[in-house]
Amino acid sequence: MNERTDPRRRGDGLGWVTRAVFGDERVALAVDAGPPAGHTVAARYAVVPSVARARFLLPLASPRVTAAALLGYNALRPGKVRAVRAALGMAARAGVVARAPFPVLTVAVPTGVDPAELLLADRVSAVLGGAPTHAACGVRPPDPNHKPTLQLFDGSGTPRGYAKIGWNDATRALVTGEAAVLRELSRVAGAAGHPGTPRLLTEFSWTGQVVAVIEPLPARLRRVPADAPPDFAALLAVARRGGPPAEHRPLAGSPFLARLTAEARRAASRHVAGSRAVAAVAELARRHGDTAVEFGHWHGDWVPWNLGRHAGGLVAWDWEHSGPDVPVGFDLAHDAFQRAVVLRGAPVASAVAEVEGWLARHGNGLGLDARRRGLVADAYLVEMWLRTSRLADAGAGWNRTLHPALLDVIEERHGG
């Protein structure tokens, strides 16, 4: 089959997603064509809005499933997207979408072969037990740092969870890391102030990939506004894993500084820019070594689009960058940085100014005086560059928004 019928041959987002989700070549894919001889149809998807501009693979198992895929978590989406999905969801319930002129992707497996051997949604059904599972999947441009994610539903349209697929070294590490964090967080469920967290349902390897299946988010979850103020109780509960405050310790001699030093040296052994990171860590220690701060965990990607409200409480998801032994305040700094870069398209230098302003306005809520705020800002920038470097080394490529701009700003702050 060519790229006209089998989308896995394409070089765009549809090709990338279908290669990740339907990686076994025994699975036959065809757009607007029937299955080859000797194959049985296992699933059908509407390619919305078109093959060339694909944004969504919409399951056509039944009107209920199609509608659920469109309406699920709709309250978390931007207003215009929410309106379009709501209209399509109503149409799907009436069976109109199945008759709409969207291209149809047919998925077929060799007759007599158990679909659970070849298809991820069927494998999830087998692992979790119960009714058959149907999957919906967003389509985005190819990016080695992004993970295809399946929304999973049973035949009635009830959400069963979502499956994240780690398909290269970078994303496999992220999926595995999040699964480990979710296992740990199950022990602090219900702790005062701690945000609700979806449970890990299962994790398994699949055709060279790593798959984590996570329970559904609450059905009535509402998005956190982009301009929402920080939730200090939640930030501190995340940092302390629901426990008491930790004793303040100086940066010098901390496991955190030791890790930054080791990671910067590894980066220097791989690429020229790493030597700049080594110098940045040394300068961080010189400037802030005597400053004592509280160290704890962080979410790692604490931003409004990973947060929601349900039943009066906060819910947080996407814990793949979470880790221990960082200065308390990293999530606060990250929130400001990402709002500036992602929501407003600000350059790194402007985003760093936003971080400083955000910490100045809200740092007292986390016990950060001026010296500690300076440490948090400087250390966070080094941490973010090292994250960028790790992802690049794992095959994700350099994030051109952050590299080398982060190193440039760090050196300017250090007077270099």
Image (cartoon, rainbow, N blue to C red):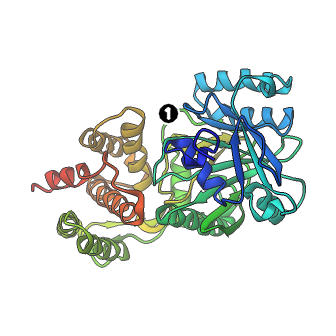
- Residue situated furthest left in the rendering: 416
Q: Is residue 410 left or right of residue 158?
A: left
- Give the left or right position of residue 273, taking residue 313 as reference: left
Residue 44 position in % (x across, y down): 77, 41
The kind of residue on which mark 1 rests is Ala
Give percent across and percent down for residue 15. 56, 46
As displayed, is residue 186 above or below residue 215?
A: below
Image label count: 1
- Tell me which residue sits at (72%, 23%) in the image: 101
Could you tell me which quadrant the C terminus lies in? bottom left
> Looking at the picture, does residue 245 appear above or below residue 308?
below
Q: Is residue 257 something one can see in this rendering?
A: yes
User: Is 373 placed left or right of 150 in the picture?
Assistant: left
Q: Quadrant of residue 104?
A: top right
Seen as rendered, the residue at the extreme front is: 37
The residue under the point 68% across, 49% down is 150
Residue 91 located left or right of residue 404: right
Q: Position of residue 290 (x, y in %)?
A: 23, 70
In front: 53, or 178? 53
**Can I make out residue 329 in this image?**
no
Local crowd size for mark 1, using a 10 Å CA cut-off: few (<14), some (14–19), many (≥20): few
Placement of 196 over or under 80, stated as above or below: below
Where residue 307 sits, quadrant-wise, is top right
Q: In the image, residue 151 lies at what x, y percent? A: 71, 46
Q: Secondary structure at mark 1?
A: loop
Residue under circle 1? 226
